[in-house]
Amino acid sequence: MTKLLRNISQLVTPEGPGPKRGAAMGHLRIVKNAAVAIDAGKISWIGPEHEWTGNAEETIDIGNRALIPGLVDPHTHAIWAGDRLADFEARSAGATYEQILAAGGGIWHTIRETAGATSEQMAALALPRIYALLRSGATTIEVKSGYGYTPASELRMLEAIQLLQTQTHAHLIPTLLIHICPKDAVERHEYRETVCRDLIPETSRRGLATAVDIFVEHHSWSAKDARIILTCAQSHGFKIKLHTEQFQRIGGVELGIELKALSIDHLEACTPDQYQSIAASNTIATILPGVSLHLGLPTAPGRALIDAGAAVAIGTDLNPGSSPLFSTAAALGLAVRLTGLTAAEALTASTVNAAAALGLANSGRLEVGQPADMLVLETPDWRDLPYTLGQNMVSEVWIAGQRQPA
Ligand code: NIG
Ligand code: FE
């Protein structure tokens, strides 16, 4: 059965598979007065409406509004219990995120709140957050573990993602995050052994994640430990990702490039001498502007990375401590304002490049043969999406050719 969406003011999309790097990030295909045909959940025709000569069983008038690909959110920690309101208050009174973490709060606090929950409880807490991201335009959402800490609890977090997938049509991509580690060297060594001996093999055996991520930072894993954990992950067939250069530069970017990570994420503390090597690699530079806004940190050098020829993606980093940002579209708009991306580059970063950061070749663009994951905006001009603050410009979310309930 063919469904035709007509009276589309502008159809706006990156063209061809990602990742796009450097100047190519700014190139979009724009079809005015467009129509799109959908068959069996996939796009079967795109063009100016007056060129459509086919037959459609169902025709839907989009009402002279813009159509763009469903966004891809390549970095979220959507599952957590408890809150970080006390941290927020302490930070407003002058404490820093790193001080709170070093004193055993922050991420450690969320682990204490989350680790004991059942996977059903975790999923119930996360479902409204997934819906918020979906309503904001994300049709594909990565979700990390990382607040479980013990292998049993990390596995429960990954099971919670499986449960969530039965409750939403958004495509959820699960990542095992090896988040923080004991300060004590002996305990850290033991924990690392447990991760490599039990957690990673069990996650692989049960097919609970597609990638393994690690937090490389002064207050967490060293690049040396990260190499051991990530190499172990690769030997079990996982793609790898790194949280790195959020506060300090301790070798995470170089390790990620060397091990051919899918993505290196954060990069607020990245320095100009690193831009060329990031640009020369196939690793996606994922920037998270919500973190800069919420923590008052310097922003990642999005503009400079693109100018150097890198492939940049944007994520919300939705989490209770560093980025309580429940809108993937808002992350796109913040990247324009805070990191100097153009609107076109930001759309590429939030679609095909974000898909590439998850190892997905078939997401994030409107093209014949691609899944009909797409967004109808509130207005005829797609630039209202990055422009508008504090109001949702996504009017309808379509996944596999089906309009999602509001
Ligand atoms: O991406 N920096 C490490 N992990 C998360 C924050 C997690 C938290 O603060 O709870 C991040 O910023
Ligand atoms: Fe994160």
Image: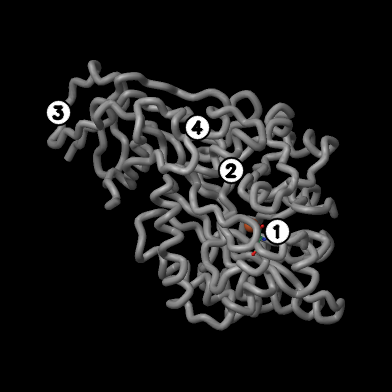
Quick one: label 4, few (<14), some, or many (20+) residues within 10 Å?
some
Helix, strand or loop for disc 3: loop
Between disc 2 and disc 3, whose residue precedes? 3
| Residue at left offset 54%, top offset 64% | 209
- The residue under label 4 is 387
In the drawing, what numbered circle is on residue 51? none
Helix, strand or loop for disc 2: strand
Spot occupied by residue 1 in the image (x, y as percentages of width and height): 17, 40
- The residue under label 2 is 314
What amino acid type is highlighted by mark number 4?
Answer: Tyr
324 lies above or below 282: below
61 lies above or below 271: above
Spot occupied by residue 125 in the image (x, y as percentages of width and height): 46, 70
Q: Is residue 107 left or right of residue 247?
A: left
Spot occupied by residue 356 in the image (x, y as percentages of width and height): 56, 43
Tell me, yes or no, whether the two marked residues, 1 and 3, touch with CB atoms within 8 Å.
no
Q: CA distance from mark 2 to mark 3?
A: 39 Å
| Residue at left offset 77%, top offset 51% | 245
Tell me, yes or no, whether the two marked residues, 2 and 1, touch with CB atoms within 8 Å.
no
In the drawing, what numbered circle is on residue 55? 3
What amino acid type is highlighted by mark number 1?
Answer: Ser
Foreground mark, 4 or 3?
4
Q: Residue furthest front?
A: 93
Q: CA distance from mark 4 to mark 3?
A: 37 Å
- The residue under label 1 is 92
Q: Give the camera-side residue of 235 and 90.
A: 90
Helix, strand or loop for disc 4: helix
